[in-house]
Image (tube, rainbow, N blue to C red):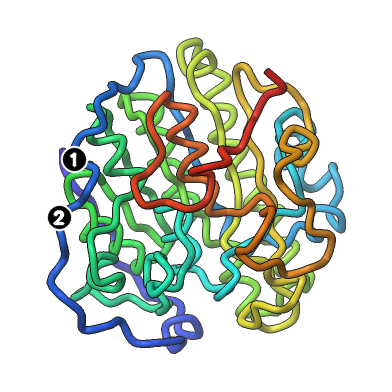
Amino acid sequence: MRRTSFVAAAVAGLLSLSCASAPAGPEPSPDRAATVGRAVPDDRRVLAISVDGLNPAALTRLGKDRTPVLHRLLAEGAATRNSRTERELTLTLPNHTGMVTGRRVDAAKGGHGVTWNTHRPDTTVQRAAGHGVSSVFSVVHGAGGESVVFTGKEKFTLFDRSWPAGVDALTYDEDPLALVRAARRDLLHEDRALTFVHVATPDVAGHEHGFMSPAYLDAVARTDRLIGKLVRAVEGDEELRREVVVVLTADHGGKGRDHFDPTRYANHRVPFLAWGPGIAPADLYALNPDRSEPGRTRTSYAGRQPVRNGDLANVVTGLLGLDPVPGSEFGQDDPLDLTAD
């Protein structure tokens, strides 16, 4: 499978940020999910969408008129606007690594160890953790399926280096329209078990103009239209309409000039939804009484958990009929139910 990279200028404000250095650590350990003993069914596919920097308050501010697609997915899917990020950090790369591994950040407590938020081409998740770390990509690969990543930020090539067998193709393009068009073409013409699409538009506008500013809200509205292109592609194809479930979340929110303080409600609150065949409209907390609706609290990793963006990994494996990601924490013992059955 051909691997594609479109190199463009990076977002300067974000590239200057680094919370911690990657541990020198050992060389990457082998992925523990070489095989899982199950095969990806022919009639199941997942489109996972991460909207970088999506504060759910923006959807309230914009309303259905300006964000009709996101409002529709929330209304028709199993959804909540009150999911949580990783507790430790409300930064892009640590949270996306949590999404695909199902782990917290803190490596000393079984986490993935990715604490930085810049492009570091000489390291891997395994090196950060100090041991082998599996991902949803490696589980899908072990079950005979393909995964593809479309991203607006170069630092996501970390996934390609960390799970080279699991990421069958990675496309990086800072033009969000070109990126979504590429993802749409791939959806229509390739048979992937997992398509992961990262849309950076709100985060870029938030850092340039302020989160929840008029320019940021305009960026969320544009992102809604981009997501609409993917949803229409799914609905317009008979096979995709039967097979594809959309799972959507965000890495962090934001208010003002940044999203760096993990104690702030505006930063650690994100949406989470699943929409598609077999999923009826429902509140995710009503479907999952073993999860705790967090109100405005930050939440720890002790006791009953909220829905987290890190649930994405094992929501995907569950939708594909596969075992949870080895070593994962979120959704391992309490898988997120998407239906009342």
Location of residue 267 by image quarter: bottom right
Q: Residues within 10 Å of mark 1 (few under 14, many from 20)?
A: some
User: Does residue 93 appear left or right of residue 275 in this picture?
Assistant: left
Q: Is residue 333 above or below residue 185?
A: below
Q: Position of residue 287 (x, y in %)?
A: 74, 32
Residue at 47% across, 36% down: 316
* Three-letter amino acid code at the position of disc 2: Pro
Direction front: furthest residue: 303
Q: Amino acid at mark 1?
A: Ala
> Image check: 141 left or right of 89?
left
* Residue indicated by mark 2: 30
**Residue 238: x percent and y percent?**
50, 10
Query: Would you name the residue on which mark 1 appears?
Result: 34
Q: Is residue 125 visible?
A: yes
Q: Residue at x 49, y 50 (%)?
A: 177
**Lateral position of residue 283 relative to residue 131, left or right:** right
Q: Residue furthest top?
A: 238
Q: Are marks 2 and 1 in contact (CB under 8 Å)?
A: yes
Q: Residues within 10 Å of mark 2 (few under 14, many from 20)?
A: some
73, 188: nearer the viewer: 73
Q: Residue at x 43, y 34 (%)?
A: 317
Whole-percent x and y of residue 110?
Answer: 40, 65
Q: Secondary structure at mark 1?
A: loop
